[in-house]
Amino acid sequence: MRLGAGWADASATVRQVPDARIRPQGYRLHIAGDEISIAASDRAGAFYGMQTLIQLKRLFPRALPEMTIDDYPDYPTRGVMLDISRDKVPTISTLKMIIDELAGLKINHLQLYTEHTFAYREHQVVWKNASPLTPQDISELQTFCRERFIELVPNQNSFGHMERWLKHAPYAELAEAPDGCTLPNGTRQSEPYSICPTDQRSIALLGSLYADLLPNFDSRLFNVGCDETFDLGQPGTRSEALCATRGKHRVYLDFLHQIHGLCGKHRRRMMFWGDIILEAPELISDLPPDAIALEWGYEAAHPFDERLAKLAGAGLAMYVCPGTSTWLSLAGRTDNALGNLASAAAAGLRHGAVGFLNTDWGDFGHLQYWPVSYLPLAYGAGVSWCLDANRQTDIPQTDICQALNRHIFNDPANQTAQILRDLGNVYRLGREVGNSTLLFRILQKPKDQLSALLTPDDAAGLCRQADAIAAIEARVDRLAPGRGDGALIIEELRTTLRLMAHCCARGQWALGDPAITLSLLREQMSQIMPEHHRLWLARNRVGGLIDSAARLAAIAAEYA
């Protein structure tokens, strides 16, 4: 392979050399003068060696220093899961951009989380306004992934998180709690949430979905979800009596076995979120022996060790599943994300996890823009490839940012990643809340609920955050990332800042600050809402935008 001018005074030649002594997916990159060789035991390893060579070219554009790199991954599977159901469905061009970037980070597993955003042939009423992925889309993405050594894995939630189905008449009778349920935080949800595990029509529905979805994927893995079944067995639900006699978790497990049977019919290996079964660890040994448990947790202090030990003790295959901390936040939670990702990687290696799956969710309107996810996605890729080289204690955030500016943002001024890092740490200047930020919660809740959320002590924190946001906004004016979408990234950052500033003002208004007037809040929202619409369509399909924008419109209506 010829590299062309610009590498050295003479063009260099790259030779890919098979070497069975090198670990799977590993490589030896040797540079001596004009000769560059990449030795690997498999094609994936040669590909990853080339990705390192591309990175070296960015670091040494004129001439490569002589070196030898021996490299291989800690985790055989290094994955990312993107939420495309709440509410953003990215365009195919956006997904291809993301896949290319993930491949450069040596990610080899991708899931697109779906609840209602696949175009099932017999269920158009569910997805008709969602701009779903079609079988043709999956085929195109799968080919694109395969060329980059990424396994595209089907993902369809199959128990809880079914409200997008159950709100439609053809499926309403399948609801476990037709009149709603009580959430773990004590609030009441009026809409149905989970499908009823004791209704055989539920398993029939899943059977029809799987028969339509799974033939579009080459992967033998299948994530069936089954997390957060909050309503199962609650008073007034359809399974209440059976849960009282057999136990809620046994009822859950029985339904999971039925789902496992459907997976077997399609020769797929079932992956499932492990949160519910870990509430009853005595039942873990009764899980299907070939199932893969996905242990998720999104706080830096999440007890991965304790929970993985229970799964490992039963001999179950496991993935460790931290997250980017971007959802419910607007700008992310940088410090929490880095701690969560590194902690998960370390615990997974201690307990024999075979995979690392970094999750990126979009709850309550998917109001964070794509650039907010870059730093935690890149760091997750680093700690899952080689934890020792990327531990937060050894690698300062400034070094992480420099790497992002060089390899992701093409920012010679070395500013873009630092701004995203600092923006993602604004949450620390106010009261911290779990799996979210206070600013997002201020935006999420109507005014009559803000008094229960905020206390007078929050006023000082809101002022500190407002000052930090203003300071970062001044820095954005000097940004110049050299990517093709660099101007779009700047616009996304500016709208993020406006949203965050509005949250500060809204909180101060709710606390009675006389300096915050309704006219100010109206003016802020009049700028934010059309920008949110425009920026959404720059990377995503139109489906879901109505739902997302409606959340902002409801807030704006309070200022009328």
Image (tube, rainbow, N blue to C red):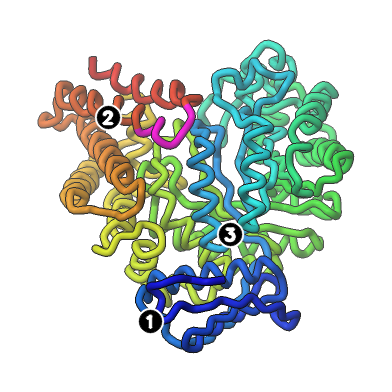
The percent position of residue 491, horizontal first and vertical second, equals: 28, 40
Q: Residue at x 38, y 81 (%)?
A: 9
Q: Which residue is mark 1?
A: 9
Q: Is residue 123 above or below residue 401?
A: above
83 drawn magenta: no
- Residue 250 appears in the rendering: no
Label whose residue precedes the other's in the sequence (1 or 3) = 1
The percent position of residue 190, horizontal first and vertical second, equals: 56, 19
Q: Which residue is mark 3?
A: 107
Q: Amino acid at mark 3?
A: Ile
Q: Residue furthest left?
A: 515
Location of residue 462 by image quarter: top left
- Asked if the residues shown at circle 1 and circle 2 are in contact, with their CB atoms under 8 angstroms apart, the answer is no
Q: Residue at x 81, y 50 (%)?
A: 283
Give the Cα distance between marks 2 and 3.
Answer: 34 Å
Tell me which secondary structure the magenta stretch mostly adopts. helix
Give the Cα distance between marks 1 and 2.
Answer: 52 Å
The percent position of residue 390, horizontal first and vertical second, equals: 48, 72
Q: Which residues are magenta?
A: 535-541
Location of residue 1 by image quarter: bottom right
Frontmost residue, 282 versus 382 = 382
Mark 1 vs mark 2: give the one in front. Answer: 1
Mark 2 vs mark 3: give the one in front. Answer: 3
Q: Which residue is mark 2?
A: 528
Location of residue 20 by image quarter: bottom right
Q: Residue at x 18, y 24 (%)?
A: 523
Instruction: Count residues near mark 3 (Cα–Cα under 10 Å), then give few for <14, some for 14-19, many for 20+.
Output: many
